[in-house]
Image (cartoon, rainbow, N blue to C red):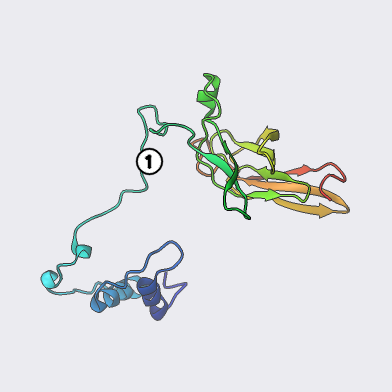
Amino acid sequence: IANKLNADQVETVIREGGARMPSFRRLPPEDIKALVRYLVYNEDVQLGNKDRMSSIIDLKYSIDGYNRFLDPDGYPAVKPPWGTLNAINLNTGEYAWKIPFGEYPALAKQGLRNTGSENYGGAVVTSNGLLFIAATSFDRKFHVFDKLTGQLLWETTLPFAGNATPAVYEVKGREFIVIACGGGKSKDPSGATYVAFALPNGKLK
């Protein structure tokens, strides 16, 4: 971290938080200084009497990762859908539509479709009302929906999960959409590629 931030900047992040890191302003000043000395200069500072505080932050808790509540087969141990795609009417704040989003291929083979699944990645919407999104981790699908109804209009399978937001661009009057496919949260072997689709002329004006 010393290659990115100086001691004052590290102390500010500890006190005020940053990105996903919360603020630790409740730590005593000497603790914060000790953390800064260790992180920036690799100095092991002895803090003396450990009984100086009775705050909850002195309790010996730790974290072993972000664990999920799963059933014995490894699927979410709650009633489906396990992931949804939602459209909100910004004029009313109400849901315009809500559909299950994503599948587990092994369950789909057994006839258990539309279960929904974890999904990571945003959508893009074109001026004629098409919503493009990948995001689903396990089925590796790339989808096109009607933004007004949530009706699935087209889908294809990507080489790896596309846990990213697509980008739409134009070259010499022809429009394309591209998605980064890296595998993301999928348990399948990860890869690193981009997939681009040429869109029909005149469809996205």
Residue 55 image position (x, y, % from top left) = 18, 67
Residue 195 seen from this side: no
Task: Please say if 23 is above or below 122.
Answer: below
Residue plotted at (23% across, 55% down):
61
Q: Nearer the viewer, residue 183 or 66?
A: 66
User: Where the N terminus falls, by quadrant?
Assistant: bottom left
Kind of element beneath mark 1: loop
186 relative to 164 in the view: left or right: left
- Residue count near mark 1 (Cα–Cα under 10 Å), binned few <14, some 14–19, many ≥20: few
Residue plotted at (39% across, 73% down):
16
Q: Amino acid at mark 1?
A: Arg
* Residue sitting at the far top: 110
5 relative to 89 in the view: left or right: left
Residue 78 image position (x, y, % from top left) = 40, 33
Residue 6 seen from this side: yes
Residue 110 image position (x, y, % from top left) = 52, 19
Residue plotted at (36% across, 71% down):
14
Mark 1 = which residue? 68
Residue 171 image position (x, y, % from top left) = 84, 53
Quarter residue 21 falls in: bottom left
Q: Nearer the viewer, residue 148 or 5?
A: 148
Quarter residue 71 falls in: top left
Task: Please say if 36 is above or below 137.
Answer: below
* Residue sitting at the far bottom: 8
- How many labels sit on residues? 1
Quarter residue 149 falls in: top right
Residue plotted at (20% across, 57% down):
60
Task: Please say if 165 is above or below 114.
Answer: below
